[in-house]
Image (cartoon, rainbow, N blue to C red):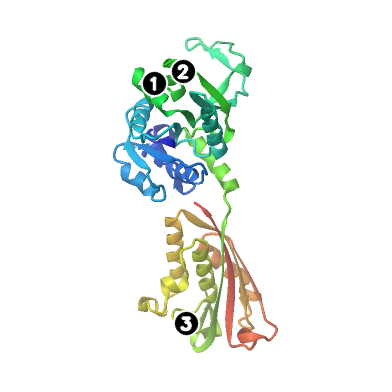
Amino acid sequence: TTAVVLVAAGSGSRLGSPFPKAFVSLEGKTLLQHCVERLGEWSRPHTVVLVVPEGWQEPARALLTSSPGARVVTGGATRTASVRAGLAALGEDTDVVLIHDAARVLMPLDVFDRVVEAVEAGAPGAIPHVLVVDTLVRISPETLITEGGPNRDELGGVQTPQGFVASKLIAAYEAVAGDFSDDAAVMREAGHDVVGVAGDVRGFKITYPEDLTRAASVLGASVTPLVGVAMDVHQFDENTPLRLAGLTWEGEKGLSGHSDGDVVLHAIVDAALQAARLGDLGEHFGVDRPEFAGADSSVFLSHALSLLHAQGLRVSSVGVQVIGNAPKIGPRRLEAQETLTALVGAPVALSATTTDGLGLTGRGEGVAAIATVVLSTT
């Protein structure tokens, strides 16, 4: 079988974070969560061993609910010590082991396949690498004078996952002493050849704050936004004031409802909850909740936004169409847009239409609103 040892025990000091590096947030998820989720999409059967710092075992286990057979172990003071801890947790039936840095969250899965295939083809070990595109020089630490360096055509930038025959890597770690920057160096020290396979520039290692910015840019370009669409309808009630789009409309008939009946805010909240797969308006603020009787609908919006934030999501944009003969939206459309934008914390576009005399709104019996909400990660 194939096993992946995910090394996640490093500190976040160079990222300027008080948390271990693997538990630093990137687009609403920790680096470790990104890695675990990516491995969950790998079609090759495999087991996972997470190597994390002391005290971070439980947060790591929480990521493995859909990974049967996965294990969490405590790492050491160095990468070499952490890998040793991960190897000690492998099952006896492990044939091929991959050692992967949790800081390389964007490494495509086809690189994992290439590494495994090279080992299965007979190599004791295989490592992914990328071409060196910059000219390399030697720099004197005393004088800072530069000298000509090696030929870059003969060099490669080494990445992970690094794959090995499991028994040979375990024996190599038992045979050598000292600390090593990667696992291929351990194998070479033990006398084994390690072959190279094509890596991927997206597999860069997140080390400094600017690397987080770079990774967020890549993720933002590849993540599909979440979209929700919802409709709300209320009948007129002459005995209540009209609240619509966060505004009070003097001299207009109000709308019936358990709360203030603001169909625009109701539609926005419902669409946001739908986009985030968090249920619907009735589930959170239904008529069985007496505390919301007559409530200002902006309370519903604030609660929904807090739920989104807890999921690492935010509203990117909102579009709402009001359907009805009255009130006339045009004279207050810009005012309503500004109010809604302030409440939502994202651009809101508002328009209005009628149904040419058809249906409840066409007969002048009430007002409807349809909202589209787009969410993105925080």
What residue is rendered at 34% in x and 21% in y? 174
Q: Which residue has dot 3 on it?
A: 257
User: In the figure, is residue 280 to the left or right of 82?
Assistant: right
Residue 94 placement (x, y as % from top left): 41, 34
User: In the figure, is residue 240 to the left or right of 79?
Assistant: right
Q: Earlier in the sequence, mark 2 or mark 1?
A: 1
Residue 356 placement (x, y as % from top left): 70, 83
Q: Which residue has dot 2 on it?
A: 192
User: In the figure, is residue 115 to the left or right of 309?
Assistant: right
- Which residue is more in the foreground, 367 or 42? 42
Q: Are marks 2 and 3 in contact (CB under 8 Å)?
A: no
Rendering quarter of residue 316: bottom right
Residue lying at the far left of the rendered structure: 55
Mark 1 residue type = Ala
What's the mark number on residue 172? 1
Residue 319 placement (x, y as % from top left): 61, 66
Mark 2 residue type = His
Residue 222 placement (x, y as % from top left): 59, 47
**Is residue 65 visible to the viewer in this orientation of the structure?**
yes
Q: Earlier in the sequence, mark 3 or mark 1?
A: 1
Mark 3 residue type = Gly
Q: With respect to residue 255, does 299 lie above or below?
A: above
